[in-house]
Amino acid sequence: MRKAAGLRALISLPVGLFITFFQDHSAQIGLLSLLVAAVALAVGILSLALGSTEARNQLPIAVAGVVVAVAASVALTRSETSQLALFSITVAGFGLVIGAFELYLASRFGFGDRLGRDLLISAVLLIALGVLFVAASLDEVSAVGFFGAFLILYGVHWGIAATTEEKK
């Protein structure tokens, strides 16, 4: 599971840093960033699942990554005026669906287990992202900025999880 945690960190941090330091916070940049992160996550989890039974538990996350990538690709072909709404819907769906699945995995592994706690923290971050995009009326800069901030927090969390030693 450490490889999967490291993979999430290696995907989230560069994309989040790109958003943070790139001056254009348009919905198109948000969609492109979402597309890159979703494709990388799906491909990474699928490649890990080929060699690990633990990573196979995360196959629904890879499927959701593919769905998000398709949605982001379709949204990029639409007019600039509709891209913000499509970006917000896609990010909200991504956060709520993946967050709910990770909450399920956390309860399955047990909240007393290290992996269960890591998945719980991840689920809370994802669900909070989804709720933010559903509940708040965000402008372009705020929406892309919050997505970038989420990616940084998510990447740092999984980076710490990947490098922390197991207690014996």
Image (cartoon, rainbow, N blue to C red):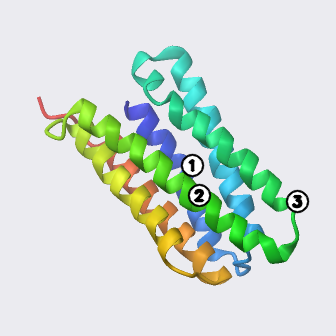
Tell me the distance, in whole angstroms, between the alpha carbons under discs 1 and 2.
6 Å
Residue 155, by quadrant, is bottom left
In the picture, measured across the screen, residue 23 lies left or right of residue 106, that is: right
- Which residue is at a point 64% across and 82% down the rendered structure image? 141
Nearer to the camera, 94 or 50: 94
Q: Which label is found at residue 79?
A: none
In the image, what residue type sits under mark 1?
Ile
Quarter of the image containing the N terminus?
top left
Q: Which residue is mark 2?
A: 14
Residue 30 visible in rendering: no
Q: Tags 1 and 2 in contact by the CB under 8 Å rule?
A: yes
Residue 147, by quadrant, is bottom right
Residue 116, placed above or below residue 53: below
In the image, what residue type sits under mark 2?
Pro
Q: Which residue is mark 3?
A: 77
Whole-percent x, y for residue 127 in the image = 41, 58
Foreground tag (3 vs 1): 3
Residue 2, placed above or below residue 70: above
Whole-percent x, y for residue 72 in the image = 74, 55
**SS of the residue at dot 2?**
helix
Q: Which residue is mark 1?
A: 11
Nearer to the camera, 63 or 5: 63
Q: Earlier in the sequence, mark 3 or mark 2?
A: 2
Crowd tier of the residue under label 1, counting other residues whose Cα lies within 10 Å: few below 14, some 14–19, many 20 or above: many
